[in-house]
Amino acid sequence: MRILLGEDEDKMRELLRKFFEMEGYEVFEASDGEAALEKFYDEKFDLAILDWMMPKMNGLEVAQIMKRERNIKILMLTAKNMPEDEVDALMAGVDDYLAKPFHANVLLIRVAKLLGVIRQDIKQPLVFIPNEKRVLLHNSELTLTKKEYEMLYYLYQNQGLPLTREQILLSVWGLDNENDERTVDSFIRILRDKIGKEFIQTVYGIGYRFELPKE
């Protein structure tokens, strides 16, 4: 099934694209409202996932045009989480509404219901719940300290990118810390013990890289 993903935050859009592709969906990206509409007119989609606060044309405006033009399911993702915001979105024809931050499994289930999928097996091995600082590995909760969570989440947010020990140290512990790069190595060993070695790869001569294992 084909999903149009309209999201202006590059990192969020990339994470969502990889997330849905792992579930077997075909994903087309747009970084603003006008680009989302252009793709909508050029292609056929089963579902549009739109961020409300996109530049050039916001997600609500895009959703209203899409609904007038074609019968398409629309899921709104947004940081706007007041009851009146949800009412406005639903009145504009949006089929479902999910406020950020959201549980990744909830997003998958919402998408599956909108698409009429009777059963949706969630294949994503690692699921973050940022507002609660929790992580699920194969649907089982991990026991992590605050710093272990922060390091793992930082690696996950930068998946596919080689990160130096200094980058990790500064990003997780900040400028005013008394730790050295050996601290990073120690925490990497702990995380590998907890989640498995396949997620965090050593990049020789540089540092580490996070990758979701391919099936």
Image (cartoon, grey):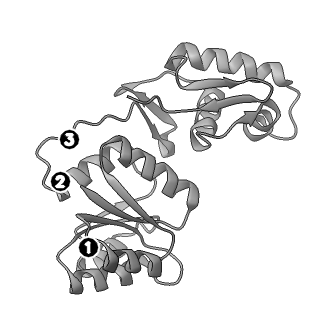
Q: 170 or 37, which lies in front?
A: 37
Residue at image location 59% in from the left, 31% down from the top: 149
Q: Amino acid at mark 1?
A: Val
- Chain-order first, disc 2 or disc 1: 1
Please tell me whether residue 126 is drawn above or below residue 197 in the rendered image.
below
Q: Amino acid at mark 2?
A: Lys
User: Gap in Å between the C-alphas at discs 2 and 1?
Assistant: 14 Å
Q: Residue 30 in the image: state x and y as whole percent.
A: 46, 69
Of the residues tagged 1 and 3, which is closer to the observer? Answer: 3
The disc at residue 120 is: 3
Q: Amino acid at mark 3?
A: Gln
User: Gap in Å between the C-alphas at discs 2 and 3?
Assistant: 9 Å
User: Gap in Å between the C-alphas at discs 1 and 3?
Assistant: 22 Å
Give the residue at mark 2: 113
Packing grade of label 2 (10 A; few <14, some 14-19, many >=20) is few
Query: In what element is the residue under mark 3?
Result: loop
In the image: residue 12, left or right of residue 107: right
The disc at residue 94 is: 1
In the image: residue 190, left or right of residue 1: right
Residue 154 shows in the view: yes
Q: Residue 12 in the image: state x and y as whole percent.
A: 52, 55
Residue at image location 36% in from the left, 48% down from the top: 20
Q: Quadrant of the N terminus?
A: bottom left
Residue 103 shows in the view: no
In the image: residue 176, left or right of residue 150: right
